[in-house]
Every structure is written in structure tokens, then in C-alpha cells.
Image (spheres, coloured by chain):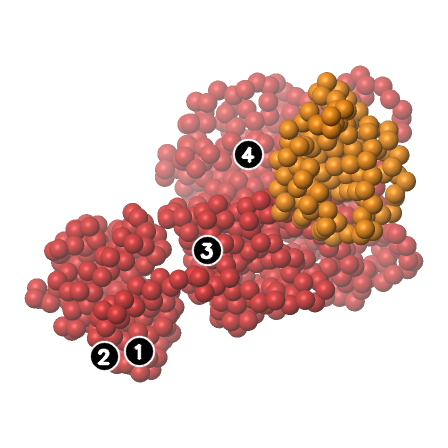
Chain colours: A red, B orange
Amino acid sequence: MAPLAGDPKTIVQDHINKHKVMIFSKTTCPFCKKGWSHDYLLFTVWAEFLSGAAQDQDICQISRHAENFSEWPDIWTDSIEKFGGPNGFLGGAMIICSLLFGQNFYLEQHRIKIYVRYPDMLKTFQNGQTFGPTVLKNLVDRMDFYNGGFIQSSLAEISGQRTVPNVYINGSHLGGCDSALAAHASNKLLPLINPSTDQYDYDLIVIGGGSGGLAASKEAASLGKKVAVLDFVKPTPVGTAWGLGGTCVNVGCIPKKLMHQAAILGHSLEDARKFGWEFDEKVSHNWDTMKSAIQDYIGSLNWKYRVELRDRSVDYFNSFGEFKDPHTIKATNKRGKVQDLTAAHFLLAMGMRPRYLGIPGDKEYCITSDDLFSLKYCPGKTLVVGASYVALECAGFLAGIGLDVTVMVRSILLRGFDQQMAEKIGDYMANHSIKMIREAVPTKIEQIEKGEPGKLKVTAKYVKTGEEFVGEYNTVLLGIGRDACTNGIGLDKVGINLNPKNGQVIAEAETTNVPHIHAIGDILDGKPELTPVAIQAGRLLARRLFGGGKEQCDYTYVATTVFTPLEYGACGFSEEDAIAKYGEENIEVYHSNYRPLEWTVPGREENACYAKLVCLKTENERVIGLHVVGPNAGEMTQGYAVALKCGATKAHFDTTIGIHPTTSEVFTSLSTTKSSGLPVDQAGC
Amino acid sequence: MVQQIHVEGHEAFMKTATEHKGKPVFALFSGSKDGAGSSWCPDCVKAEPVVKECMKFVPDEAVFIECGVGDKPFWKDPNNIFRKDDKLRLKCVPTLMRWGTPQRLEEEQCADSRLVQMLFEDE
């Protein structure tokens, strides 16, 4: 609870933007009291709004009871059902009270700020001595120190009014006590707070028809709202585009997993001989058969989403959307036809697109995952640039279907993932005919021969020495990262705050700094970039906005899987993140190599598969990280995610009897710790 | 004007569809009508007037094939050719589709004019 440093004017404006109803008041001001105290009209009016606006809302109001004023700070709270008398009373201060109308929130999450005049008042708060009901403790997020005089000056600058109470509704200045009472008397106050959405074409416009956007739009529509979805795919540099559904469906998870399966089946064919199957020596793979079958399936999904939207009366526009003003979008379709669409709320869900290297020849001759899954020809001898999960997964299945694959990595593999596991993935790939060039970057791509595929000459250099080398490939596939699609759609026009480092949208509970504009999915700053996360966040947001829902998206313990040739499942902290957060002495890692039974007969590796549990000693060895490389890692990890969310400890895992024979049972019998230094190589079952 | 062709059975359908390769082809598969002109399939009966009404949305150069799949016992056989053929894989009647694409409507969807219009108009 540190004092907040910052320009008072920015802070004031921020408050005005953030809250539907924002009242700046002063404890010693009788007109503020007029507005707020139970005995006065305005308070009665607010109770009226509440019962009309939504059921089951709690309002916490911090205000001041003038007669009991004695010392600083001065705060009490009251829940709306109890109005008729103060519930608790504390001290006196310059107070800023925010009422969140029309939004739903848990008592604990209510954003209440208490401004104290002198820093050492804070001590009183922390000791709870002057607290009335202990509910206040749960309510107060933080306490900020401000100088009241500067706030009043800022308010004067913004609205021309220096006196309090200074009332803002939906970001617009209303006035003081008289204005508020007058508005109420003429029945204008409630419509100001909850403006009718009849003036807009839609209740919600969703920009981006991907995993998050579609989920949110369908949820909002099921709650009776008028919804539109805009989805537009800007073709790649080589001209690839796709239908409704976003990255996951068209150029991500779905085709990736299917091609990964194609590669696994190829491997299974080899193993099959050892299990007694007899067939011709030569087994070959037809790229076109695989690609066409996968594209047919994707096409059926594109169509399925079109039908779903139409069925639920969600309007779909295959158009590019740009903000004209805070409530208007300019939608341009592929033929250049323009129309304006207005809405009360907007949801940004535009997702990301692959990044290019920024070297000569990259856009002309390289492809990305956006192009790979619908490539009209077999990619042939391929250089994959990058060490993202996209790069490694693609390299993995391309090698798995029999292609000559090289991966060029600038530094580490799978940045952000547990590095021990990342290296195991890399080792496995290197042992399975994938050439790895480490610590190198391409500097130039040139075309030697046109064709489908053609021949490309890649010039690269080693990062440490600068030494140059060349290579020849049919295809160069870039997997160096993805960038949020937040440029060129007018977000600056409406004042959306983006993280300058990565262009991603800054949001709190999926709402941006502009109260009626929300964001979900890959464009969100600091959240996992995964389809199920976007779907969950989108659904819950729609419920909160339109359905009286209160649940927030829980971004913790989100399980993921990297579908490299040796799959990697993870949930919770990486080992290094756990150590960084809790300290090495408080972490115990249990681990083991293991060998799937199915690998014995075909004679596959004994020590490639590995599992570990990262446990927190200070909480009874609660399992805070689970990591596994091995076949079907995704299926394995999903169930354990539930356990981790429930706070399972190592003891829970130990007392759970395993299913035999499976690979997942390894987690029920981990006994060797890393700290013991004992080896974990497999002897046998 | 959209060319409308009526066929009975799988062989006739495939022959007609192949003949019109290169044009957009729409197909409606329904339970065949009896001598009195009634289909045994109630959903097909519901869909017929809706599809007819939406014909105005079909592009002029397209071909519309109305295919009777056979009588009820034939259709109910889980191994009948309409279900087994990879290019068709019909799960039910009525099925309305844009031939050669994954775009299709099934059962009560065929009686929803919004969906039928969307199928006919889509590019």
C-alpha cells in the first residue's frame, strides 16, 4: 500500500473515464452530504437506480457523516439494503467515492479509494483500530495519497468547476449538487447513468471472429442482445486468406494438430512392423491428400460458424473495422464497400499475425504458419526460422511426414517455457532427423529457382562470431513470433491504452481504459495467448456486461501443451519461475524419466520421456508446477490441471493409485527429488 | 434463370452433377415422393416451400438438382449409398448443399429461410 505518485490531473481524468458515476467530494462539504446522506433525495434516487438496473448488486459507498466528524481519516461503508443509517464509521478525509453502476462486482473487488491527508493515518487503517465493520477491510484495495488541493485544481481545469460535489456521469461532467438534484427532479438523471441503447445499431460489436470473438458474441446474443461480428482476413504477403473462425480454426491449433497426427501415424507405421504388421517396404506421404482433407474439415468449421451466427441472429460482416469515433465503426468489405455501424459496447478480439524478419527477401520468398496449412504444393526441404512453439511444432510434423527439415534458432528454445523441458524437446527433435542450427539468424533470402516449391538461397550468420554461411532450401518458414493486430484500426482515435513494447491492449477485467470498449484473446497484454482462455474470458465478459454475471476469468493454472514430436504438457509454474518467486530453498522438485510401454516392443528411447512436479515446501508441498514430455502429453495434463487448481499437494499425488499400464501413472509414484542428486534414468518396469 | 433438374437415386444424381461441372451446383436431397406426390419425410415436406421461395437468391448461372433418395426403408438402411459415398456422406434428409463444398444444411435448418438464403447467396 504505497503512496501513488503521479500527476493529479491524469489520475482525476482516469477516475472520470473509469467509472459510470464519479463523485468528487469533501468531508466538510454540506452539499456533498446533501447528495449522499441517507436522509437526502439523491441517495434515495440511487437506491431506485439499483433496483431498476440489476438484481443482486451490492453497492458500497464511502461517504461521510458530517455530524460525527472527529478525526482523519473519515470513512464508513453501508450496503444498500441497509440504508437508513450508517453501518460503520471511521474518521475524516478528503474522499473520492466511486459508485459502479450497471456493472456487477463482488464486494471484495469494489474499487474504493480512500484518500488520507496525512501519511501516518495509514497506520490507523492497517491496524484496523478505527474500522467499523470488518467488511471495509475486504473492500479497500489500496490507499492512495493525494493532496486535496491539487485534485480540486485538476477538476477545475477539466470541468471549470472547482467546488464539490463534482459529479461526472459516463465520463461527462454533470455539475454539482444542484445540477444532480435538478436532473433527478426532471427524470433525466437515470437515463444519463444508463443511457438507452436504442440510439445505437447494436448492443455489442465484436471486432474479430476468432475463438474469443465468436464465443462472446454467441453468449451476448443468447442473453438477448443485438450483436454484430466483424471478421476480415488481410491476405498474407503471398496471398493466403481464410474464412470465419480466426487463427485457431484456420491456421493454428486445428490444422496443426491434424498434421501432427499425420506425422504420428507415420511413426506408428514404422512401429507397426515390430508389432507384426507386414506391408510393403516403401511407405510414402502425399502432401496434397493430407492438406485437402484438412482444408475440407476447416471449411466445414467456417460454415458451421456462419450457420451458428445466423441461427442466433448475430450479424456477420466480412469487413475490416476501424473506429471513427468512440461509438462508431467504419466497416469496409473486400470490394471496398463502406458502411458505418454504431454500438453501445465494443469487444476487441482481433488476435495476432506472424512477424517477419525484416531482412531482404523475407516477405517475397518466406512463408509463415498462415500459409503452410493450405500450401498448394509440398514444401520440400524446409528451413524453419525461430524457436517458438509454432516453429518447433511445424518443424516437427514436417519432418514427421518425411521432409528434410532444419531449424535455425537465435538463442533459446521456447522462451517463457520451462527451459529444462524445452531442451528435452530440442534433443528429441535433433535425434529424429531434424537439423538444428543454434545461435544463428538469417540475413538475406534470395530466389535461385521459381517453382512450387522453388529453390531459395538463405544467407545466415552466427550471432556470436558474425561468421556467415549459406544454405539452399525449397521453403523457408518463419516462426519468430506474432504481433497483435492493433495498428491501423483507429484505437488511438478513441484513446485505447496499448503497451508500447508489444502493441497489446492494456485491460483490467477485460475492459480497456475506455469503459465501453473491452478486449479479449491474444491481443490482451499479460495474459496467456490460448484459444480456451479467450473463449472463457469472452463468455464471462458477456455475462458480466449483459447477464448480471459476476464471475471473472481465472487466468491461473491454465494448462498448455506443445505438440512437438515429443509432446510437452505443462500446468502452473516453470521450475525457474517457481524458484524466482518463492526462493530455491522453498521449492522441491520430484522427477523421473519414464518409458511408455508401447515403446518397448519397437525399441524406442528409454530415457526421452520425463515428468516432474514442482512443489512448494512452505505450503505442505503444494504442487505448483507439473511438466511432462511424452506421447499424449496434452491428454495427460488436462486432468491434473483440475488437481492443481484444487491445491493438490505431493501427498495427494502419492496417495492416488495409478492406472496401469499408462504413462500418466508416473505422476503417482514420483519419489526422487532433484535436490537428492540421484539419477532418474529408467531401469525397467 | 436457375436451371432446375429433378433426379431419382444416387446414380442419376452423380451423372447430373458431373455434367454440370464448372457451374455452382446446389442439391436438395429429400425422401422420394409417392404416386400421390407426397414425401414420407415430414421435414422434407416442411422444407420444400421454403427452399422454393428462396430460389430467387440462387445465382442465375447455377444449377439446382432436386434429388429423391428413395423410399423410407431404403433410406433407413445405415449402409445406403447416399450415406456411404465419401462425396456425400448424408446423415439425414432433407439435406441442402452447395455441391463440392462443406456448405450444407440439414433437417430443420432447411426450413429456415435465413439459413437457406445464406447458403444460396454465399460466395
Alpha-carbon distance for marks 3 and 4?
A: 27 Å
10 Å crowding of disc 4: few (<14), some (14-19), many (20+): many
Under mark 1, the amino acid is Leu
**How far across and how far down the image is residue B27, in percent?**
77, 39
Identity of the residue drawn at 49% across and 39% down: A625
Where does label 2 land, which residue? A163
Q: Earlier in the sequence, mark 3 or mark 4?
A: 3
Residue plotted at (32% across, 59% down):
A100
Select label 1 or label 4 by which is in front. Answer: 1
Whichever of labels 1 and 4 marks the residue nearer the N terminus, that label is: 1
Cα distance between the residues tagged 1 and 4: 53 Å
Residue B53 horizontal side relative to residue A647, left or right: right
Give the spatial CA distance, label 3 vs label 1: 28 Å
A396 left or right, relative to A618 = right
Q: Amino acid at mark 3?
A: Glu
Residue type at numbered disc 2: Thr
Residue farthest along the front direction in this orientation:
B36
Whichever of labels 3 and 1 marks the residue nearer the N terminus, that label is 1
Specify the subunit that label 1 lies on. Answer: A
Work out whether mark 2 precedes mark 4 in sequence or the reverse, and give the earlier one. 2
Q: Work out whether disc 2 and disc 4 sit on a shared chain.
A: yes
Most foreground residue, A658 or A542: A542
Q: Is disc 1 surrounded by few (<14), some (14 to 19) or many (20+) residues within 10 Å? A: many
* Location of mark 3 (residue): A510
Disc 1 element: helix
Chain letter of disc 3 in the image: A
Element type at marker 4? helix
x, y percent for residue A433: 79, 40
Query: Which residue is denoted by mark 4 in the rendering?
Result: A637
